[in-house]
Image (cartoon, grey):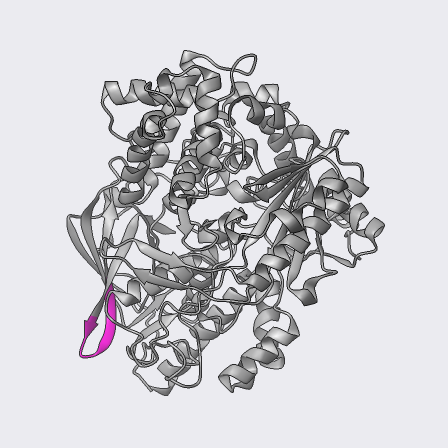
Amino acid sequence: MSQSPRPRREALPDALPTPKRQLPMQRTNDFARHPKDGWTYADPYPMSDRYRARLHAIIERLCPPPPAPMSGDLLTQIELHVRGFMMYMHPLAGRGLWLAFILLDWAPRLLFMSWRRLGDLDRQAADRVISRITSTRWMPLRLLVVGIRGSVLSAYFDLSEVHERLNYRPVPFLKERVALRERLVASPALLGATALAAE
Amino acid sequence: MTILAHEDYEADQTFETDVVIVGTGAGGGAAGATLAEAGYRVMFIEEGGYHPTSSFSAYTTESVPRLYRDASATMIVGRAPIPYVEGRCVGGSTVINGGMAYRPPERVLADWERITGSAELGVEGLDAAFSEVERRISANFQSELSIGEDSRIMEAGAKKMGWHYTTNRRNQSACVGANNCSLGCPTGAKQSTLVTYLPRAFERGAVCLTEVRVEKLLIEGGRAVGVVGRAINPRTRRADRTVRVRARAVIIACGAVQTPLLLARHGLGKPSGQLGKNFLCHPNAKVLAVYPQKVDGWKGVSQNTQIREFHEDGILMAENFVAPGVLAAYLPFHGERAWELMSRYENMVLSGVLVEDSSSGSVSRTLLGMPLVRYELTALDHQRFKRGVKLLAQMHFELGAERVILPFTNQHEALGPDDLERIDTLQTDVNTLELFTVHLMGTARMGARREGSVVNLNGELWDLPGCYVADASLFPTAIGVNPQVTIMALATRVAERLQLHAKAA
């Protein structure tokens, strides 16, 4: 049997640094998109302006066209979200996604479907290319597009403008639920009155 | 409460403590609180950040990078490939899970007793530990007011089909059905380790070093004496500071992928060769039904019930509604078709089929430091998925669903029961299955003999004294239900064993 630690009850060493960040433990949740909890969001994944322009074009081909919400400003928001995601991935996965965007843009040429790049194709032609890749039996190629599509559409369907169109209004709902729980916790009688579903 | 972050560390800093615990999820949280309450100086190390209840929102783009490992861009390689997610924040995966509080079925614990040769891992042996965990995380049933329409539809479906279903026990206290479990519970009702075990540990003086990725163990004289990590700059995401923690015992609780990855760096697990083997993952497939009526699945608790009619055949069914940003990541469509489908968001019921593994995979370390997780689905499990998806889709059509989105790359949609008949003929290749998982288990299995296990029944590595494992890696087999209660029970037991050692010494 190996040696194991005995409990010590003395205080922690003075060397322990004082936290610089203020932890807002008691702050009421305002459900902001960027909550002020002292956490720093990473800078977007670095990209040249030229690459960003190509990325915008690909994002536009993947996202729903009008009458669904779409504008230059929304494209920029999606681009920033995608570049944000990339910073939190394993560095190799982030670089892989960067490369995947390039490959997807060149896919029409690589698949001999068009001499133009994906971002330069009209929507119908781009749809055909994307659909062909997502239905291929060659797994790595399929996953490449599925990964890109997932990150772009996840960012698109998280936009407030899109939430509004889907009749998805989480902030008032969550505020109402937080208030309801506070009332339940403050009043044990009320809590008891909410019969348990399984009993 | 002392929670430190990147800006608090010097370029090269060393801390000392009694027990250092890597990870703050179900395993790390439970072990740490148990030890802190016993009077040990406990120091947690967490790769993610600290995000209090008051910071949780329904925004995917903000929440996923904050709370999920690698912004959820993690994948199991094999036939079929399976995306998986893990928590990376203080509280770990308990912050983002569905909050199910199930004990393993008795047949599983009987298997554990047989495999390990120890009654302590059997039904009776673990009963007290389960009871204690259930008390601490308030495992109980939902109140009526928290239940949403999608849960009621699933229940009605089970009744109509004559299927057995159960109401889930969940780790919740006065849950009001905010249905934001996967992005952090904003009401504080879900009893994750963030609001249960960890505050208790902090009250007893435990310290948490956040934004530190542990890269190796400190080993001296053949014994684990601490860990070395790198603090990650939150703005650049580069590891630019070194943090060492010297301790008299090390507990690794980073989950079934990261734990073997860390141990493999030191060539541990040699006696049995089992480190990283026996990877289990309860793969599941989504079945998305669109109803003519308004459902508003985003209102009301997720997974109030589970359909258990086919549990003995290794199949579970449940609903699990998520925010549009999360749902869209798994859509089989893009452009206009994606909008056409998502514009019916308020009419959707998102359900799933979970299959109990009949095979196992492995986790290994690649040259570039990334984990390589491999898993091959068996023909039996492929059959289970086809059967489960078909049954669940049939249930939705019986209830009046207009269309059902299926988890097959070559058959995305069924517009009626007749389309489901084609599943058997079309789905011959396992690669067409679109799967997903959140239950990762079994890569440093516990056992009584060093030839067949990585750690002993105390949770201590056979080949590295002073180093313990306290997470889902310990599981000798898949458990077939949501694992957090089992992880907490085993982690509590590991912490208690560590104390017994101390007293004996």
Q: Hey, which residue is sitting farthest left in the picture?
A: B11
Residue A36 on image: x %, y %: 41, 31
The answer to if B42 sits in the magenta stretch is no
In the rendered view, would you say B316 is above or below A177?
below
> Is residue B177 visible in the rendered structure shown here?
yes
Front residue of B49 and A49: A49
Residue A60 on image: x %, y %: 43, 19
Relative to B174, is B214 on the left or the right?
Answer: left
Q: Residue at x 24, y 65 (%)?
A: B265
Residue B389 on image: x %, y %: 66, 49
Tell me which corner region of the image, top left, top right, bottom left or bottom right, holds residue B288. Answer: top right
Relative to B184, is B245 on the left or the right?
Answer: left
The answer to if B225 sits in the magenta stretch is yes
> Is residue B184 visible in the rendered structure shown here?
no
Front residue of B395 and A6: B395
Q: Hey, which residue is sitting farthest front in the picture?
A: A112
In the rendered view, would you say B190 is above or below B138?
above
Label tally: 0
Front residue of A133 and B484: A133
Front residue of A171 and B392: B392
Q: Residue at x 57, y 66 (%)?
A: B133
In the rendered view, would you say B233 is above or below A62?
below
Residue B241 on image: x %, y %: 18, 48
**In the rendered view of the protein, which quadrant contains the C terminus of chain B?**
bottom left
Magenta segment's dominant SS is strand
User: Which residues make up the magenta segment?
Assistant: B219-227
